[in-house]
Image (tube, rainbow, N blue to C red):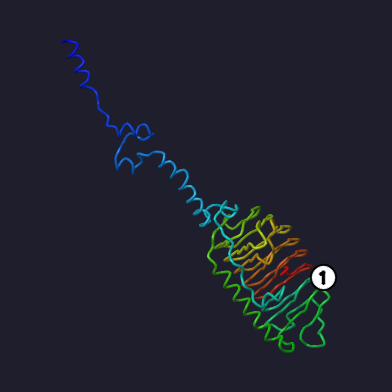
Amino acid sequence: MARIVELSRFAAGLTVVPLAGLLALACGGSGTVGATGTGDGGSKGDGESAADGGNTNDSGGNATDSGSTTDGGNTSDGGTTSPQAVNLGTAGDYVILAKAGISTVPTSAVTGNLGVSPAQATAITGFSLTMDSTDLFSTSAQVTGQVFAPGYAQPTPANLTTAVADMLAAFTDAAGRAPGVTELGNGNIGGKTLTAGVYKWGTGLLIPTNVTLSGSATDVWIFQIAQGLTVSNGTEIVLAGGAVPKNVFWQVSGDTDIGTTVHFEGIVLDQTRITLGTGASVDGRLLAQTAVSIESSTVVQPAP
């Protein structure tokens, strides 16, 4: 009888675990069962997956879109997407186009057409122009192409007016694109490799060392710069992976200062002036709403 009583007492102290609880424990649950436990983290594996996987991917994309991380624009999976190219209209008929003047310190080598408007031909200096017999354009030993000014015979003046209007429209178009990356490098992108996309800075942009633009022949880069663009002496803009200069657009609200012996790629749409230092070379176009100054420089229009 004493043994039966002892067994009864032992049984009374046991806790009965429901079958559902046993199943939850067997599946790795926290032991807290029911709607509250499952939603709040009773499934620890799901909670960790959301924190370690889903949220990381989401925040990675958001960091790239906001530009709060310097890595965002540097990787092909950083969240930036290639925009449509900026339509230059008839401004694309010129390798250098300016409203106030174009000057060179000889000897420069320019491949493509030059145009100035509304300033007259006298604002094109250093090129030793020779008027063509048609009076439609002039030529220069430093220019493989033609030089146009408003005082020449029609339709040159009308064509220049249209080209300048197209230049202004292209600037506005480039400035209005939605950025995928903002304030990258706090305004200093030296040494970076950038994939296609729209990049924006509320300040000036400094390029003190080489920058690589990596992408295909159809990828497009648009750089929106609220102040000036400065490229330090000897720096190169390198195109990699098949990227082409006609798809690189630098929209600059301040001065563009390209230093000595720099090699630059792309189309500069500048609201003020563009200056090239001695020995600088550009594969692209220089389109300025005031003036362009070059000094023993090489400027070659991009392939179509």
Element under disc 1: loop
Image height of 127 relative to 296, above or below: below
User: In the picture, which quadrant includes the C terminus?
Assistant: bottom right
Q: Say which residue appears at 73% left-offset and 61% top-offset.
A: 263
For the view shown, which residue lies furthest in the top direction? Answer: 2
Q: Quadrant of residue 193?
A: bottom right
Where in the figure is residue 10, as x and y percent of width and height? 22, 18
For the view shown, which residue lies furthest in the right direction? Answer: 141
Q: Say which residue appears at 53% left-offset and 65% top-offset.
A: 178
Is 265 on the left-hand or right-hand side of 176?
Answer: right
| Front residue (pair 136, 183) | 136
Where in the figure is residue 13, as x and y percent of width and height? 22, 22
Q: Say which residue appears at 25% left-offset and 26% top-offset.
A: 15
Image height of 213 relative to 155, above or below: above
How many numbered marks appear?
A: 1
Where in the figure is residue 149, as x and y percent of width and height? 72, 83
Q: Say which residue appears at 60% left-offset and 53% top-offset.
A: 76
| Front residue (pair 79, 91) | 79
Q: Quadrant of residue 1?
A: top left
| Front residue (pair 282, 73) | 73
How crowded is the residue under tag 1: few (<14 C-alpha within 10 Å), some, or many (20+)? some
Is 38 on the left-hand or right-hand side of 98?
Answer: left
| Front residue (pair 209, 55) | 55
Where in the figure is residue 26, as x and y percent of width and height? 37, 31
Q: Amino acid at mark 1?
A: Thr
Q: Quadrant of residue 230?
A: bottom right
Residue that carries the numbered disc 1 in the rendered image: 107
